[in-house]
Image: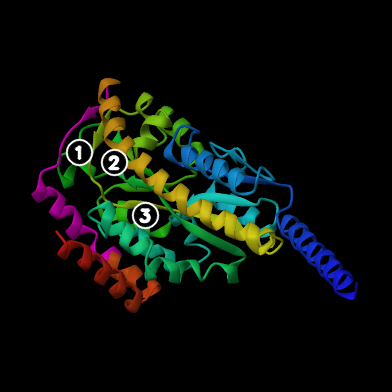
């Protein structure tokens, strides 16, 4: 009889422990809505990446966590969105790493002109030890970085004439990101760099307040820049790295399970977003041509002149980033090049 009672008690205790554990696990994931701000159109790889991220988060949280994307700077341009995330007003922002330089100066590394020649080189640096070191600097500034996405290589467009050689850039008023490396790079190439939020770009081009801009083919297409620009030239001067940010005030409210869901979803969405971006880039260029943009190639010797012109910019900002980090990045790039 005693044995039967003990067995029954053990079963009840085991069942109770299991129920408590199950309830505790369920409590680790709460009903939440996460707002994600980004600056491009919804059909840009950014937007498609955010949609993929939202789907993954919903699936991994059994529908408890809802991610809502706000495209085209609806919640503010990149820098204000970062500030909103730091202040706890906004949960997440997908921004260019360039917009983070004012917060963590070492992120300027990814803006170095002609640092990367291919996407594989960029992946090695961003997803490796160098990229992690920079993400590790964000919490002290009120942010958490989940992972890196991309916007692709940037190219100059303008409304005045084709850029077939270095001298053709001389005197062009070119809108660029509000970032010192970009400003110095465009100025070093001979243009007059005009810092401006992306949300103001279309109107500035339409009214001829600026002659041109520089950006990836996908962004030029999805933002309809082709409607107010005629000439497009593949300068490929800077690779557009993107970082997925979470405000630390919000991040610290999350359980371990919730944090893991966001982290894992970002990584999976990264692979998807990059694949979409790399497929969309040549397709976007082809469509821009059919829509009337005049595209021209730039001879290799002229591109070499451009790379030479911007070397002082790299030297200048290496001091901010640090020799050790720059050397580490170049070592990772060289490993990729040796694999060819």
Decide: is 214 above or below 117. above
CA–CA distance in space, label 1 to label 2: 8 Å
Residue visible at 74% across and 58% down? 22
Q: Which residue is mark 1?
A: 163
Circles 3, 1 touching at the beta carbon (< 8 Å) = no
Query: First in sequence: mark 3 or mark 1?
Result: 1
Query: First in sequence: mark 3 or mark 2?
Result: 2
Q: Position of residue 198 (x, y in %)?
A: 47, 41
CA–CA distance in space, label 3 to label 2: 12 Å
Q: Secondary structure at mark 3?
A: helix
Q: Which residue is mark 3?
A: 182
Seen from the viewer's position, the closer of residues 229 and 13 is: 13
Say which quadrant the C terminus sits in: bottom left
Seen from the viewer's position, the closer of residues 303 and 25 is: 25
Mark 2, residues whose alpha carbon is within 10 Å: few (<14), some, or many (≥20)?
Answer: many
Decide: is 78 above or below 339. above
- Please check the rendered image and state whether residue 147 is part of the magenta-colored stretch, yes or no: no
Q: Secondary structure at mark 2?
A: strand
Q: Which residues are magenta?
A: 292-313
Left or right of 219? Residue 8 is right
Seen from the viewer's position, the closer of residues 337 and 89 is: 337
Say which quadrant the N terminus sits in: bottom right
Q: Which residue is mark 2?
A: 156
Viewer can see residue 193: yes
Left or right of 22? Residue 281 is left
Decide: is 195 above or below 246. above
In this picture the colour scheme is rainbow
Mark 1, residues whose alpha carbon is within 10 Å: few (<14), some, or many (≥20)?
Answer: many
- Please check the rendered image and state whether residue 308 is part of the magenta-colored stretch, yes or no: yes
Circles 1, 2 touching at the beta carbon (< 8 Å) = yes
């Amino acid at each position: 009889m005693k044995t039967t009672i003990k067995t029954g008690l053990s079963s009840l205790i085991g069942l109770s422990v299991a129920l408590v554990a199950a309830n505790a696990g369920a409590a680790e994931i709460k009903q939440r809505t996460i707002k994600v701000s980004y600056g491009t159109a919804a059909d840009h790889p950014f937007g498609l990446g955010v949609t993929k991220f939202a789907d993954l988060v919903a699936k991994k949280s059994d529908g408890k966590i809802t991610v809502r994307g706000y495209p085209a700077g609806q919640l503010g341009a990149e820098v204000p969105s970062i500030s909103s995330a730091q202040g706890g007003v906004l949960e997440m922002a997908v921004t260019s790493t360039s917009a983070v330089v004012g917060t963590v100066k070492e992120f300027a590394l990814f803006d170095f002109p002609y640092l990367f020649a291919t996407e594989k080189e960029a992946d090695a640096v961003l997803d490796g030890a160098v990229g992690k070191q920079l993400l590790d600097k964000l919490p002290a500034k009120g942010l958490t970085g989940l992972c890196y996405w991309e916007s692709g290589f940037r190219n100059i467009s303008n409304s005045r004439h084709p850029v077939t050689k270095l001298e053709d850039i001389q005197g062009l008023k070119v809108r660029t990101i509000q970032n010192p490396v970009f400003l110095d790079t465009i100025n070093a190439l001979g243009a007059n760099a005009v810092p401006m939020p992306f949300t103001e770009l279309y109107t500035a081009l339409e009214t001829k307040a600026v002659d041109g801009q520089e950006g990836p083919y996908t962004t030029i297409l999805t933002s309809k820049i082709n409607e107010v620009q005629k000439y497009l030239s593949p300068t490929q001067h800077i690779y557009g790295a993107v970082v997925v940010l979470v405000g630390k005030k919000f991040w610290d409210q999350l359980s371990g399970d919730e944090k893991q869901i966001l982290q894992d979803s970002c990584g999976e969405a990264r692979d998807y977003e990059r694949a979409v971006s790399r497929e969309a880039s040549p397709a976007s260029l082809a469509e821009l041509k059919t829509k009337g943009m005049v595209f021209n190639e730039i001879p290799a010797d002229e591109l070499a002149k451009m790379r030479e012109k911007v070397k002082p910019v790299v030297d200048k900002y290496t001091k901010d980033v640090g020799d050790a980090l720059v050397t580490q990045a170049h070592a990772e790039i060289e490993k990729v090049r040796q694999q060819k």
